[in-house]
Image (cartoon, rainbow, N blue to C red):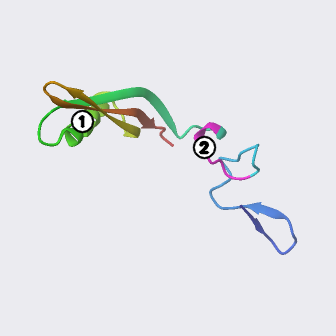
Amino acid sequence: MALQRSSGVPVSAPGATQGQSSSAGGPALSTRETIVQPHVELGVMFGQALGGREPVMSALQNLQAIGQEHGCDAIIAVKLMQYPTSAGPAVVAYGTGVKFAKP
């Protein structure tokens, strides 16, 4: 979004100057459109749990622990999948580990 001065000259909104999208003419809506990447993707990771009282929570905690082991600052885009087994439901949490760029 551009702000207008009284002279009619468009001025960029505060904080939007770094990530300008060439396709839309405004701030970038995706990190793929920015020149400077705010993070580095470390890869797809997964945590799993078999049976138990709360297998979804266990799978997410395992995913978080694996991310910490690999130096991730966050896990994004988590997908939960459940597979039936003879020992009970197996839950697998898949996610993308990211490390934020230092300014």
Query: Regarding mark 1 in the picture, which secondary structure is present there?
Result: helix
Nearest to viewer (mark 2 / mark 1): 1
Front residue of 62/12: it is 62
Q: Which residue lies furthest to the bottom in this view?
A: 6
The quarter in which the N terminus is drawn is bottom right
**In the picture provided, is 97 more to the left or to the right than 67?**
right
Q: Which residue is drawn at 77% across and 62% down?
A: 11
* Residue 57 left/right relative to 103: left
Near mark 2 (Cα within 10 A), the count class, few <14, some 14-19 or many ≥20, is few
- Is residue 11 depicted above or below 82 in this figure? below
Residue at 85% over, 65% down: 9
Q: Residues within 10 Å of mark 1 (few under 14, many from 20)?
A: many
Q: Nearer the viewer, residue 33 or 84?
A: 84
Going 42% across and 33% down the picture, which residue do you hit? 96
Main SS of residues in magenta? loop
Dot placed on the residue nearer the N-terminal end, 2 or 1 = 2
10 left or right, relative to 1: right
Mark 2: secondary structure: loop
* Amino acid of disc 1: Ala
According to the image, label 1 marks what residue?
Answer: 59
Q: Which amino acid does label 2 sit on?
A: Ser
x then y, percent, for residue 39: 50, 37
Residue placed farthest to the right in the image? Answer: 7
Foreground residue among 91 and 30: 91
Q: Quadrant of residue 57?
A: top left
Which residue in the protein does label 2 denote? 30
Q: Magenta segment range? A: 26-32
Q: Measured from the top left, where is residue 72 in percent x and y?
A: 36, 34
Residue 86, relative to residue 54: is it above or below?
Answer: above
